[in-house]
Amino acid sequence: MGRRSPSTRLRAALAALAVAAATGAVLTVPEATAATTAAGATGYASQNGGTTGGAGGQTVRATTGTEIHAALCGRASSSTPLTIQVEGTINHANTAKVSGDSCNTAAGVIELKQISNVTIVGVGAGAVFDQVGIHIRESSNIIVQNVTVRNVKKSGSPTSNGGDAIGMESDVRNVWVDHVTLEASGGEAEGFDGLFDMKDNTQYVTLSYSVLRNSGRGGLVGSSETELSNGFITYHHNLYENIDSRAPLLRGGIAHMYDNHYRRLNESGINSRAGARAKVENNYFEDSKDVLGTFYTDAAGYWQVAGNAFDNVTWSPKGTDYNPAGPNPVSNTTVSVPYAYTPDSASCVPDVVARTAGAGKGLLVSDGSCTPQTPSPTPTPTAPTPTPTPTATATATPPSGTNLSIGAGADGSSKADGTSYGNVRDGSLATYWSPAGTTGSVSVKWGAPTTISSVRIREAAGAGTVTGWRLLNADTGAVLSTGSAAGTVSFPATSLAKVTFEITSATGTPRVAEFETYA
């Protein structure tokens, strides 16, 4: 469920824009400023070691999509830091595949695949990606800033990136998208899909000071009700305007929305479902319908609300698979975020967002004072510097007590054929879960917060052995411990509802027979 044709309100608004264009009254893309340096990443993109993009590396200029690909392919390695300054219009005619050891590109799409430590930033008169999407796959530490992406289609001609303006999938970590404008000209019937989509184990992403408009679908986190490996997403100081639904759609995971201006959400807005937990605060909802709830499914999601403003918002009656949070939204969960932030009051959000959000706004920001300002540049590091995390040496000594994983739930990232997440908490060494490759994650979860202080990972003999891992508090994204071999690890007692074992390296495809947890 969740697929709905574009509403008549969206089509009417787009028709009005067409009339304006015919009379010469349509707004043009604002001229970009020359600013190319902004304060550091905010929200969840600031966690998990932080997001610095190409800081500390070479800076090159590109005016075509082919030149962007050539810059990626010209690096010494796929992780060599690189900043690409883009000016002009990127389209299908000038975006060709380029080959090299440090890249994996394709024609007709900006392909950031199997790479890390890259910044793409619009400069000069501005960068417009016209019908060409930006695809981030199996990559980490990426910044996209001060660009416009418009009219990317999944059907009709030309097509690009599955119809997503910016799409992320398959083990993506730490992406900061800032001061961008993402636009479509209709919904699925017109050939468009999402403006900002994340799926298949994408985590630690921030979308800030951006504009998303004129689309049937704003964006999603998770591609299905069982694809719950995504999360830790922050949305702040964005404008969602003339969007039918998915502002965004959350399937599992944690998201934080603050200081966003939602205007003309035609069918539904923030759709928290399948166990997702959304912290929704100090947003301004205007001239919209059903701006928060669980929609088109009976798989409930949850929300914590505070400080929001509702201006001419209508609410539908509740049904079996339609559960609006209003007309008087109240919290049904609590969400703690691990980073510091100072939100603006909801009353000034329309003004602040209008003056700061989107490409060509000089990268202006706000610090909670309701006054746009130029950010202070952050020092340029010589290389991405991860935040120190606890390290531990796993031992073969089994912990004492009851294995709390027995009877709990489980989920994770993409798995190898013939394996199951549930095999890691069934008490049997004869069954196992494997990732779809040498990296991936599996989680144990409970219906209520549970205190654990040690974990035992037991591998089954197979094609590979775990050589690097992280243990995460999936409620907050905090790293509990890291290591280089499976076994037993202890850490300070922590109350959580979900714990994740993330495999970062292995000699081949590993087999996790048991993911045991103990108090």
Image (cartoon, rainbow, N blue to C red):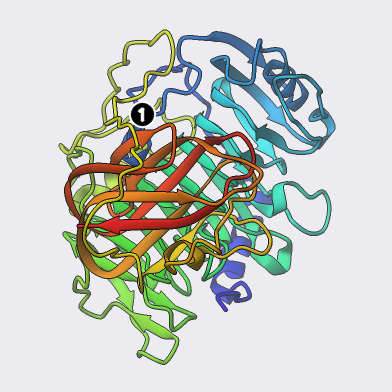
Image position, residue 298 (x, y; %): 44, 84
- Which residue is disc 1 drawn over? 49
Give left or right: position of 224 versus 288.
right
Q: Quadrant of residue 205?
A: top left
Q: Quadrant of residue 168?
A: top right
Q: Residue at x 30, y 70 (%)?
A: 302
- In which quadrant will I find the C terminus? bottom left
Image position, residue 14 (x, y; %): 61, 61
Image position, residue 74 (x, y; %): 71, 12
Residue 392 makes an appearance in the image: yes
Secondary structure of residue under mark 1: loop
Q: As displayed, is residue 441 above or below residue 290? A: above
Q: Residue furthest front?
A: 397
Q: Residue at x 38, y 47 (%)?
A: 238
Give left or right: position of 185 versus 219.
right
In terms of depth relative to the viewer, which is nearer, 395 or 387? 395
Q: Residues within 10 Å of mark 1 (few under 14, many from 20)?
A: some
Q: Amino acid at mark 1?
A: Gly
Q: Residue at x 22, y 73 (%)?
A: 332
Q: How many marks on residues?
A: 1
In terms of depth relative to the viewer, which is nearer, 463 or 297? 463
In terms of depth relative to the viewer, which is nearer, 292 or 473? 473
Q: Residue at x 46, y 15 (%)?
A: 55
Image position, residue 308 (x, y; %): 21, 61
Residue 251 makes an appearance in the image: no
- In which quadrant will I find the N terminus? bottom right
